[in-house]
Amino acid sequence: MEPLTDLLGLFAEAHALSGYEDQVRDLLAQELKPLVNDLSVDKLGNVIGIRKGTGPTVMVAAHMDEIGFMVSHVDSDGFLRFVPVGGWFAQTALSQRVLIHTADGKSVAGVIGSRPPHMMEAEDRKKVVKLKDMFIDCGATSAEDALEMGVHVGAPVTVDRDLRPLGGKLVTGKALDNRAGCVVMLGALRLLKDQDLKATVQAVGTVQEEVGLKGARTSAYGLSPDVAIATDVTIPGDHPGVTQSESAVTVGKGPVITIMDAGGRGVITPRSVLSWLKEAAEQGSLPYQLQVGDAGNTDATAIHITKTGIPCGVVSIPARYIHSPVEVLSLEDLENGASLLAAAIQSAHKHF
Ligand SMILES: [Zn+2]
């Protein structure tokens, strides 16, 4: 079995715009298969693996989708206009290489261009170029030519970027939000493979988190778990441009247990869930960090207010520069995140 590093590469280099999660869903299904008793895909496209055990049902949710774009217009010269899907900061999208995904499952390379800075007025050069003023050049010379290449209105577009090691235990790549979460979930199930489970695990790869937590909502409704954990990435405060007073979390210091996110508009983790997760980390001698956040939320936001309410927490991996093509995380945090999740699953029966 490949270590989590290789698994992260496999997942981060797969392409899954919100609503077009097929590649990651197939990959996740393939990796889940030997680890679960039952595997299915629901009507919205969530992939659900059930590993049976005694005790409570524990849902684990990791969103499969990534931010990207959708082709909205192909002009007569073969240039493409697009609509952003998910939260983009325009400055990080410019000058990127992208892949335009065709209906036959292949992809066409492209680059995101704009008016040359040399031609801009001095004032305009100081401003961020707006996404609506960018376009994709895929080498097509006309709308007909683009169509022949398989590029059409509605084609999903994602960033073209490999996973690369940095110094220490850090790696950089696209879509670590949230392939990190997918890998943490798989890593936990691998650790539990030969153990008698004291909970039934409902491992869910959710769809369309980046555009409204949609898959989490429907899958939580369908599964109705006793307790749930969303696994995702979170923003650290450990690099220039941000301070520890804004985010006390640091890359490499362990997975993060959320106390509250989005100033309480996301999730306010129930005390029962908090003490369960903290105890799991402490008893396993695993490093962890606590976070009180004012920005950003996860699938937990939707899960915890499903039906009559589902106690739900978040275990996240600190990742720098999220929602950019050069996200950075620590492989050690990833391994410890998987261990924390596994320990939590094996102790859920004492708490729920
Ligand atoms: Zn995410």
Image: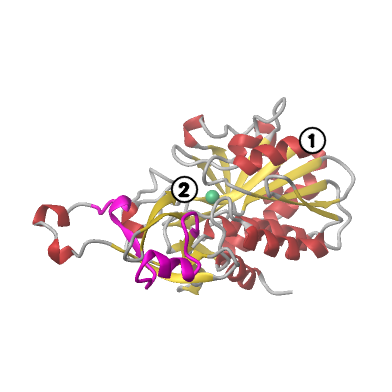
Considering only vertical position in the picture, is 301 above or below 76?
A: above
Real-space CA distance between mark 1 and mark 2, rounded to the nearest whole angstrom: 35 Å
The image position of residue 267, as x and y in percent, is 57, 34
**Secondary-structure class at tag 1:** loop
Amino acid at dot 1: Phe
Considering only vertical position in the picture, is 26 above or below 349?
A: below
Q: For residue 107, say whether it is visible.
A: yes
The magenta region covers 128-156
Residue at left offset 59%, top offset 59%: 179
The image position of residue 127, as x and y in percent, is 20, 52
- How would you rate the neighbour count of disc 2 (Cα within 10 Å): few for under 14, some for 14-19, many for 20 or more? some
The image position of residue 77, as x and y in percent, is 31, 65
Residue at left offset 50%, top offset 62%: 329
Left or right position of 274 against 266? right
Q: For residue 98, say whether it is visible.
A: no
Residue that mark 1 sits on = 352
- How would you rate the neighbour count of disc 1 (Cα within 10 Å): few for under 14, some for 14-19, many for 20 or more? some
**Secondary-structure class at tag 2:** loop
Quadrant in the picture for the N terminus: bottom right
Considering only vertical position in the picture, is 53 above or below 27?
A: above
Q: Which mark is residue 86?
A: 2
- Mark 2 close to ligand 1, CB under 8 Å: no
Amino acid at dot 2: Gly
Left or right position of 179 against 340? left
- Of 336 and 218, nearer the camera is 218
Q: Are marks 1 and 2 in contact (CB under 8 Å)?
A: no
